[in-house]
Image (cartoon, rainbow, N blue to C red):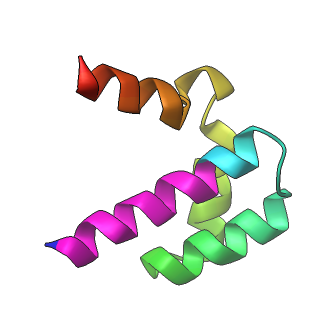
Amino acid sequence: MTDRINSAKILVQIVHDYKMGKTNLYAAQKHLAAQTKMTSDIVKRFLRNMKPSNITPFSSIKQEKKQ
């Protein structure tokens, strides 16, 4: 179970970093494809279609869980 949680955190971090401009499409695509075993073409389409408004900062997620 812990492995799934850690994997999910890694995936979220990759997508978050890409959408916030901390990494480029090529790097995010490479890391995400390696983590998910999906083809880079599918990952590229996923990343391009993900809107920045769909990304929630980690700090607000943590605050919501505490309340």
Left or right of residue 29, residue 64 in this image = left
Left or right of residue 5, residue 42 in this image = right
Q: Residue at x 13, y 72 (%)?
A: 1
Secondary structure that dominates the magenta span: helix
Q: Residue at x 61, y 20 (%)?
A: 53
Q: Position of residue 10 (x, y in %)?
A: 49, 65
Q: Position of residue 31 (x, y in %)?
A: 64, 75
The image shows residue 41, relative to residue 25, as above or below, that is below
Residue stretch in magenta: 2-15
Q: Position of residue 6 (x, y in %)?
A: 35, 69
Q: In front here: 35 or 56? A: 56
Quadrant where the C terminus lies? top left
Left or right of residue 7, residue 13 in this image = right
**Magenta span contains residue 8:** yes
Q: Residue at x 60, y 37 (%)?
A: 50
Residue extending farthest left: 1
Q: Position of residue 48 (x, y in %)?
A: 70, 44
Give the quadrant of residue 34. bottom right
